[in-house]
């Protein structure tokens, strides 16, 4: 189950994570809905595009030390782009999401994966994530509540193009 | 006057309290682990120290109203031990809180338009400002409306809640920098261009701690409309590229040094291209709305007075006028520093009674407002010169009129080994010992301007690198020792002090200071300050004299409060210092 667009839904995407011994160019991408690492997308692009032409949906995920720009020009090919949070304290994923939404104009599903906890989800939602796969063992119904922690915010981000001072009469 | 919350500020603050109340509930029920909770509580100003939880309450750019100060006094009585500690970032800390009470403390704060948001954690911290903003004679631009703009922009900024490390802004609008802008991650100096338009000179990458660095200019003039988008680009580049593998290399100063200011500037400008002139550009209407809160109070039209002459022969009052009373831009008024550095008190501490009384003084003499200084004192910014004598009498009764502002005993001091779990050595007892050894006001006045800063460890919460004399607690074979640096300075001539040599025991430090001062007195020209003599003759004569003969322990430092701190005291709970 994941949270998507503020609902809890079942989900059949599989996140492919490379083992130590896997090489991006040779790792087997299983059939079905797979979110592949950026390196695999770059190494097996032709094969993955062929799959897409046959009707398969593509997903890709970025590590926190990778840049959104690596997907420049390609974002519309993906049904899902995911950003991994290796630790919940690693905040690079917030800027990656901001770039995907605001600079690359990605409009599809943007999913937070990895060490995703409810207390970070409000900020994640603001920078552009609309889907969340909370860390295993956490109550997803509880997590959903945090998306409504604040009903008003000061700054612009991916969710609000205008800062508060332009949106309301203060 | 100061910023007042509108309905949106109230609502956001209230929702934050509710959010944290729920997080505390989940922590107490075990639903959240300490590891998960730590970041959340830090972003609400809550630390776990040696004895208890400590909360650092934000005092945005150091400004407080009398009702707010009364609330701080109330909180200290109700939830703490009847006192608070003012910090070098113009905030106030309560040292003895219970976790269960923290949400109620935040709710009490919210009732007077205060909070503890982002006073810790790896996020944008409280923005510090010139303590004489709005009243200083050398002010070009009142920085407070811009500081408030940045406060709102940085509050719960969703992209910057989990930076590589904490991030500090400081701002001044005067020719003389009283906000230490050169030792902050971003330093902003409000200036006017030839057309008279307001903008900011922007410094980046300053900071103290393990690797002290003076900030570098990244932009000579960013027009005020663009300050939010420009700052955002700096923080974004830092968020993406700052190091996260090593806590000691994670500040922006390390990134700027590693890639060079030119490359860093290029990356910032590259990012800024996308947002400059976009919706986050500040509007005149918003600036005017905020600036309207900072209008001058209703000054009477008065003439400047020769106040000292009105009390002939009163040396104590004259000393106070000389040290604690500062010039004001309006004739007939003065700004008054209430000293929190009386001998015997921990530097920066104020009791509940003092806080209440200070609020009373503010109401009576200074349009109901106070400021907190980065030297850990309070300021009444708008006092009629004709009322200085009455104010002095009352402040004296409250132990807040020690005439030592800017002198040796106006010590900047971190909490150190008494509270902070990262400490190598105690700071407060040493500050008290020094104050006791040099408790002679005539001598102190003769020595004149001297910044003495004491940090209990290399994290440098008391900015020892920029003290004219800096003292740093170090640990050697499990015992506390103190390293002494000289030649640091803050403000327009910011400099990092240099270590004079091997370190000293607690008891030796007063004698070391005495020797440094003896060299100064021997070598100085007429009105030369310690730091100027030192710059002129260099550090060698000081070093030679200090180490020339064996250094005795200071007499009269008997008693448990001066005993050597033994390291290895087992801390049985996780802990975090004010520094983090
Ligand atoms: S971390 Fe800061 S407060 Fe603690 S001892 Fe070090 S300098 Fe002092």
Image (spheres, coloured by chain):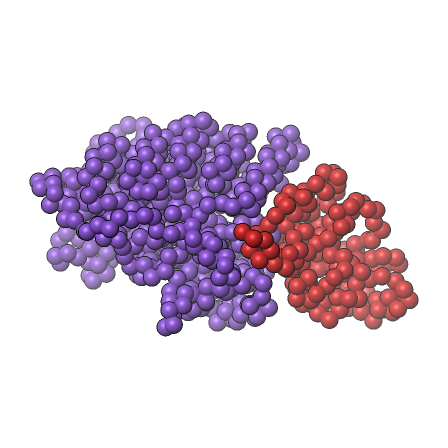
Q: Which residue is drawn at 37% across and 30% down?
A: B352
**Residue at position x 77%, y 50% in the image:** A4
Task: From the top left corner, tell me how far across and down residue A3 is, in percent.
Answer: 76, 47
Which residue is more in the foreground, B409 or B141? Answer: B141
Measured from the top left, where is residue A25 in percent x and y? 79, 66
Q: In screen coordinates, is B396 left or right of B412?
A: left
Give the number of callouts: 0
Horizontal and vertical percent for residue B294?
40, 51
Residue at 49% over, 64% down:
B225
Chain B: what color? purple
- Residue A68, percent across and down? 67, 64
| Residue B404 can be seen in this image | yes
Q: Image point 64% across, 56% down: which residue?
A: A160
Query: What shade does chain A have?
Result: red
Asked whether residue B575 appears in the rendered view, the answer is no
In the rendered image, the vertical position of residue A118 relative to residue B526, given as above or below: above
Question: Residue pushed farthest left?
Answer: B313
Q: Is residue A112 above or below residue B350?
A: below
Q: In this view of the protein, which residue sits in the foreground, B183 or B320?
A: B320
């Amino acid at each position: 189950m994941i949270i998507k667009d503020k609902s809890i839904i079942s989900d059949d995407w599989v996140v492919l994570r490379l083992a130590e011994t896997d090489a991006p160019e040779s790792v087997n991408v299983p059939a079905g809905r797979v979110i592949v690492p950026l390196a695999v997308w770059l190494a097996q692009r032709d094969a993955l595009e062929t799959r897409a032409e046959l009707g398969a949906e593509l997903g890709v995920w970025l590590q926190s030390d990778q840049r959104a720009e690596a997907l420049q020009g390609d974002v519309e090919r993906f049904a899902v782009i995911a950003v991994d949070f290796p630790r919940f304290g690693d905040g690079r994923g917030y800027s990656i999401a901001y770039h995907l939404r605001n600079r690359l104009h990605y409009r599809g599903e943007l999913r937070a994966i990895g060490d995703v906890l409810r207390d970070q989800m409000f900020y994640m939602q603001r920078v552009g994530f609309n889907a969340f796969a909370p860390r295993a063992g956490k109550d997803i119904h509880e997590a959903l509540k945090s998306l409504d922690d604040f009903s008003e915010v000061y700054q612009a981000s991916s969710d609000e193009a205008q800062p508060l001072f332009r949106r309301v009469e203060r | 006057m100061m910023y007042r919350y509108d309905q949106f500020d109230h609502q956001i603050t209230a929702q934050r309290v509710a959010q944290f109340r729920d997080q505390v509930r989940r922590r107490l029920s075990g639903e959240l682990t300490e590891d998960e909770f730590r970041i959340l509580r830090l972003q609400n100003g809550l630390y776990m120290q040696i004895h208890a939880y400590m909360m650092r309450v934000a005092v945005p750019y150091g400004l407080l109203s009398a009702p707010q100060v009364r609330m701080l006094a109330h909180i200290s009585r109700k939830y703490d031990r009847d006192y608070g500690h003012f910090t070098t970032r113009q905030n106030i800390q309560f040292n003895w809180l219970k976790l269960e009470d923290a949400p109620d403390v935040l709710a009490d704060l919210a009732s007077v338009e205060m909070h503890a948001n982002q006073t810790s954690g790896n996020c944008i911290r409280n923005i510090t400002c010139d303590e004489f903003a709005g009243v200083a004679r050398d002010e070009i631009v009142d920085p407070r409306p811009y500081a408030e703009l940045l406060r709102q922009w940085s509050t719960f900024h969703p992209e910057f809640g989990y930076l590589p490390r904490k991030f500090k802004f400081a701002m001044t609008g005067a020719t003389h920098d009283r906000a230490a802008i050169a030792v902050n991650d971003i330093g902003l100096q409000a200036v006017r261009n030839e057309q008279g338009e307001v903008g900011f000179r922007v410094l980046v990458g300053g900071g103290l701690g393990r690797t002290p660095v003076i900030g570098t200019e990244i932009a000579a003039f960013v027009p005020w409309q663009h300050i939010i988008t420009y700052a955002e680009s700096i923080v974004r580049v830092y968020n993406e590229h700052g190091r996260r593998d090593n806590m000691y290399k994670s500040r922006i100063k390390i990134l700027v040094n590693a890639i060079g200011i030119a490359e860093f500037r290029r990356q910032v400008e590259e990012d800024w291209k996308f947002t400059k002139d976009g919706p986050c550009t500040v509007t005149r209407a918003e600036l005017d709305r905020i600036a309207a809160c900072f209008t001058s109070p209703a000054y009477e039209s008065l003439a400047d007075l020769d106040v000292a002459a009105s009390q002939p022969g009163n040396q104590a009052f004259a000393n106070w006028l000389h040290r604690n009373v500062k010039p004001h831009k309006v004739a007939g008024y003065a700004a008054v520093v209430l000293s929190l550095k009386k001998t015997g008190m921990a530097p920066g501490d104020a009791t509940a009674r003092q806080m209440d009384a200070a609020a009373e003084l503010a109401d009576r003499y200074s349009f109901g407002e106070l400021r907190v200084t980065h030297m850990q004192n309070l300021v009444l910014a708008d006092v009629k010169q004709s009322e200085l004598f009455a104010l002095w009498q009352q402040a004296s009764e409250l132990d807040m009129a020690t005439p030592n502002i800017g002198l040796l005993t106006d010590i900047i001091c971190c909490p150190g080994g008494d509270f902070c779990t990262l400490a190598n050595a105690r700071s407060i007892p040493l500050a008290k010992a020094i104050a006791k050894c040099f408790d002679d006001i005539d001598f102190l006045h003769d020595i004149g301007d001297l910044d003495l800063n004491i940090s209990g460890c290399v994290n440098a919460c008391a900015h020892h690198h920029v003290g004219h004399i800096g003292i740093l607690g170090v640990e050697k074979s499990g015992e506390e020792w103190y390293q002494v640096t000289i030649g640091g300075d803050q403000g327009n001539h910011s400099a990092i002090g240099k270590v004079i040599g091997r370190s000293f025991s607690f008891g030796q430090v007063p004698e070391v200071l005495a020797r440094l001062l003896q060299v100064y007195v021997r070598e100085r020209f007429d009105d030369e300050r310690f730091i100027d003599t030192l710059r002129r003759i260099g550090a060698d004569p000081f070093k030679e004299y200090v180490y020339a003969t064996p250094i005795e322990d200071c007499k009269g430092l008997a008693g448990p409060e001066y005993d050597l701190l033994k390291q290895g005291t087992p801390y049985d709970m996780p802990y975090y210092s004010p520094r983090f």
